Amino acid sequence: MTTTTKTVKALKPGKAPKVSRPGKAGRAAARRQAGLSQGQLVRRRFLGNTAAVASLVLFVLILVLAYSAGGFLGLPGWWKYTHNEVTDVLNGGVPTLQLLPFSLGEHPFGQDRLGRDTFAQTMRGVQISVAVMAIIGLVGGFIGVVIGAAAGYFRGWVETLLMRLTDIVIIIPLIILAAVLGQVASRSVPAGVQPYFLGLFVGTVVWTGLARLVRAEFLSLREREFVDAARIAGASSARIIFKHILPNAVGVIIVSVTLSMSAAILLETSLSYIGMGVKAPDVSLGLLISQNQEAFSTRPWLFWWPGLFIVAICLCVNFIGDGLRDAFDPRQKKFNARRAKEAPVPPAAVGSGHPGSGRDLAGTDGSDD
Amino acid sequence: MSELFDDAGPAAPPLAGTGPAPVLEVRGLCVDFGVDKEWVPAAIDLDYEVNAGEVLAIVGESGSGKSASSMALLGLLPSNSRVRGSVKLNGREILHLSPAKLRQLRGNDVAVIFQEPMTAMNPVYTIGFQIVETIRLHRAVSPGAARDHALRLLELVEMPDPEKAFRSYPHQLSGGQRQRAMIAQSLSCDPKLLIADEPTTALDVTVQAEILDLMRNLRTKLDSAIVLITHDMGVVADLADRIAVMRRGRIVENGTSLQIFNNPQHEYTRALLAAVPHLGTAKDGGSVGGGAGGGEVDINAALAAATGASLEAVDGAELLRREQENAEALAHAGPDRPAGAPVLELSGVAIEYPKQGRVPAFRAVEGASLAIHEGQVLGLVGESGSGKTTIGRAAVGLLPVAEGSLKVAGLEIAGAKRRQLQALRRQVGMVFQDPSSSLNPRLPIGESIGEPMYLAGMAKGAALQQRIETLLDQVELPRSYRNRYPHELSGGQKQRVGIARALSLRPKLMVADEPTSALDVSVQATVLQLFRNLQQELGFACLFVTHDLAVIDVLADHICVMRRGRIVEQGTRDQILRNPQEPYTRRLLAAVPLPDPEKQRERRELRSQLLAAESS
């Protein structure tokens, strides 16, 4: 037995060097002739989805509008008013936006009772809400992936522990947990970064759904033979998780994170509406609605504009998420029989010799019998 | 029947029509699938007919359109497909019937036996319920009468205990019994046409032989027309009257079974027949090691000698001569060839799947002892669940050894720590069963091949690239494939990549777990040839796990037969094939269908005598 151990020690491979990944050099050049990668296929399918692409364009336009109008990172925006600047109320604060002929006027979205510009407020609200949404999505996504991956890959007591933890988080009403955590967190930081801290802490409670999805995905992927192959090749657990399994689960993760982002924006809105989220003097879309709900009958624009942007952003994110899900799922193939063309008929099977050599090297004529 | 005469009048007489009007008449059938805004043809201009009581086998590789064309008859294709041409059932056009009329037809006039009975039957209903359902959908009978009919059907398919099977759920039956139940269901309304889509592919070879027997009996009893879709030439030889060979959507040859097997006209048919591995015919003479025996083995004669049987089909003197020839060859085969150091050594090994939650530990292998020496190929055969794959996985350290000693190149694996297993992993390579699952779909294949070397720190940078190129050369793939992704490769190519990866650390022991069972027969032939050449060139020891005796015969010097977790018989290729000792080995050999109708008749007779001798 001792001799065996010695041999083992002698044969033990040194720590694998981090440099030089196989196939990196010249890969780009060779890929051009090699056909499409998985990523290219996904991109192509996504771009074929009209609703998703239109939503993406609209979402980007909203972001550009909000950030350029309101300014960010201390840079001034192009709009003349800021969100907490009080001016005289003109014409009872009615919106001056005109479509035909197009003109913005003095206050395109109107003014509130104090004379603050609603356009500036809404743009600022979009900035804050989208930022909070992104933080919630990223934090929640990260925690969900790590917990789900660990539970699904290691199984056993790790899985039991992590999944019971998940169950506990699930049974506590999300809005209460988020409100308490958000409050505690934001009280201890300066006002300017409070909304971001809110996002950070709400993110720590919304990962449960993703964790379960990722666990399920890992449970099925870890039984695939390529995982065994990697294990035989001597790969460590971390390498198997991050290099081999995670890239195969990325479709599920992206889709779930996108969809949870649109839920996050609604969660932020609800929290702000009940007064547990973003606080004045900062604004968010939810806070704007909450502040102006009494004005619903007298000055409905104060209510409609932020509402319109909430709906637009949520729809966009949902459509993008749907588009991504379809793009990652190769079984979802749209086909229109009327627009299809005739493919060139392959040469008659007469002639051309050996069945094996012919088919085996013919490339991708897959086994789709 | 009157309908038949009305419609058959004006219809053109079938081309081959000398006998009665064909039950199924297919003319100019084209099937296309829409892919990426284009119609891609799956079947082109098919013409065939099937008479009552006749079996037409449609043979072809995957992707040849054999399944697609047959499913088109019933309108069972997905919505992105298009079917043109004419299909007549008893003279009545059925191709573009309304959905309601098609529903009447399905199950009643036309029935299908699917490949995988576990997925084709609904797991939440009993067998009886599902058969009764089919009967009552098409016949106005009382539940009691339908039940009696269902029981009669289960008897007809020789179900061991029809009453019990009637009350069972699909998962409570064995694979063979499930397939019988499905056949019973498909027969429930006396279909005029029966489409059997790879009916035995998912079954073990002994069970397959039973199901083939059953289908042969039924065919004489029922007088239905049968369309048999298969890639297995052995099954075809056993059952078919006529054969249509399909390739890339076209029928390239059409003829009676004897014509096709004895005098194939088309080049493709000949190549297809040549690619089928015959049990007992190691190709190019001589087995891999070159030392032990080789040449053709007359399994039928070996079996006849072992059982002392006499055959009706073969003249007694002729059989005696063949038996003697066989005995001589065995004597000439010489002793086991002198071997080098053992690379894999198992003694008294037991392997358990550890308990999970309330599921107790399951002992998959018990008391296994075997040895593979340098440069040897040992074939491990057995049916599904016999524990053969378990041994293979334990040999590369994927499963822990519960008892006994398992040594790879001198390293003890039983009870080894993780660090010791790392050392083991530089000595072994493994080729997996399913090439599409064994390669990471997100990695270019060059990276997959290079990973073991990269992790072992054996090569890096340009040296690694060079080594990957060498490996690609060795498995006869173009070097530019290094940057392709697995989904861009065909099954055979992917399996070549799998072999290259297994070879990358220059292992002393290669474990091949059914590496060709997911491949088409012609691709299988080229991959096996490649594997043989590489084994001879590199001289690694190999544990070749398979359920297919014919495949093992091409490669192995030694054969080891497993059953229910135990090794029942082992010896050199000649000892096992020419002189099988254990009844189980004999039964296994007799169950392998031969791709030759005449020899297969002999084998069938032998098998029934063997079974009769055992039961008495």
Image (spheres, coloured by chain):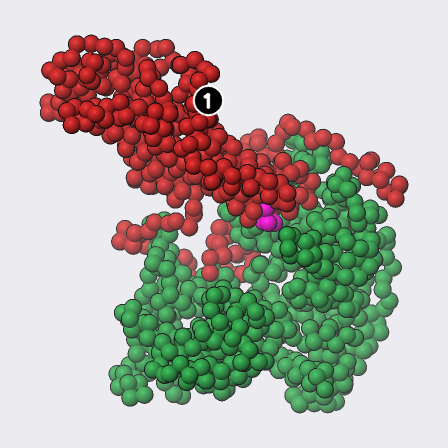
Chain colours: A red, B green
Instruction: Report which quarter residue B67 is drawn in.
Output: bottom left
Describe residue A191's horizontal placement relative to residue B598 as left or right: left
Describe residue A327's horizontal placement relative to residue B348 as left or right: left
Residue at screen point 28% across, 25% down: A290
Q: Is residue A222 magenta?
A: yes
Q: Is residue A298 magenta?
A: no
Residue at screen point 80% across, 49% down: B414
Quarter of the image where the N terminus of chain A is located: top right
Chain letter of mark 1 equals: A
Residue at screen point 43% across, 47% down: A330
Callout 1: SS: helix
Describe residue B454's horizontal placement relative to residue B219 as left or right: right
Range drawn in magenta: A221-225
Instruction: Report which quarter residue A70 is drawn in.
Output: top left
Predominant SS of the magenta segment: loop
The answer to which of B98 and B535 lies nearer the viewer is B98
Image position, residue B518 (x, y; %): 58, 59
Q: Residue furthest right?
A: A2
Q: Is residue A58 visible?
A: no
Describe residue A227's horizontal placement relative to residue A258 as left or right: right
Q: Which residue is mark 1?
A: A184
Instruction: Report which quarter residue A289 is drawn in.
Output: top left
Image position, residue B93 (x, y; %): 30, 75
Check disc 1 and give the amino acid type: Val
Residue at screen point 42% across, 50% down: A331
Image position, residue B9 (x, y; %): 27, 86
Image position, residue B417 (x, y; %): 77, 42
